[in-house]
Image (cartoon, rainbow, N blue to C red):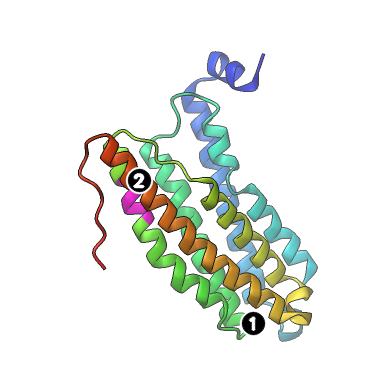
Amino acid sequence: MRLREFVENNVPVEAVRQVANWTTYGRIGLNGAVLGNLANAQADETYTLGRAIAYSVVALADGIDGSIVRLHSAGPTPEGAALDQEGDKAADYATDITLALKHRDPWPLLNLAVNVPRDYIVNGTRARLREAGLDAKAQKLGKYKTALKGITNTLAFSPVAEKAPIAIRGLRVGSAIMSIVSGVSFVRDANRQLSEAKQQPLRIVV
């Protein structure tokens, strides 16, 4: 029996949603602990392997909560989906700001400057899709973007960033480009879905 079939038939949907929500809380809490540890670190201890390993757990855990809740066909509640999405974004923004301030490095702010408007547009698009009863889950490009951002920040916490800052900057530029490309792709696909469903196509006025 497949895991999804077992969960569907034997586990109450509210229990599945609760596990997913607590996974989200745990990931956000660990992210905050890593940032607090960095904020209180001495000047010669701002790049450490231990902190990078801890953050890698945060990065790897991203998406697990969504996978858990999708084990049940009912899926997440709107509140649970918002917790996952908004919690991730808040943690990402806090990470960029803390790295920039503690490492005295403006490059993390590049990702922040790209992701804040990108996320605002994508969130609005996703809300329109849900209102129309259409698929609003992340595309593969969005998942690749998240993975690249996780790798970049994991390395930024490590001694690698101190020894090879140019390489980390290159990853940040790549992450920013991937954010833009994935955002444009998501909005374009949303317009197509809305048009096919005879909804008013989303128009973004800049």
As shown in the figure, which amino acid type bears the numbered disc 1? His
Q: How crowded is mark 1: few (under 14 residues within 10 Å), some or many (20 or more)?
A: many
Tag count in the figure? 2
Q: Relative to the observer, which residue lies in front, 84 or 166?
A: 166
Q: Relative to the observer, which residue lies in front, 150 or 175?
A: 175
Residue 93 on image: x %, y %: 49, 67
Segment colored magenta:
122-127
| Residue at image location 65% in from the left, 18% down from the top | 2
As shown in the figure, which amino acid type bears the numbered disc 2? Ala
Q: Which residue lies under the disc numbered 2? A: 190
Residue 149 on image: x %, y %: 60, 62
Whether residue 96 is situated above or below residue 73 in the rendered picture: below
Q: Quadrant of the C terminus?
A: bottom left
Q: Which residue lies under the disc numbered 1? A: 103
Q: Relative to the observer, which residue lies in front, 57 or 37?
A: 57
* Secondary structure of residue under mark 1: loop
| Residue at image location 45% in from the left, 50% down from the top | 85
Residue 117 on image: x %, y %: 38, 66
Q: Main secondary structure of the magenta part?
A: helix
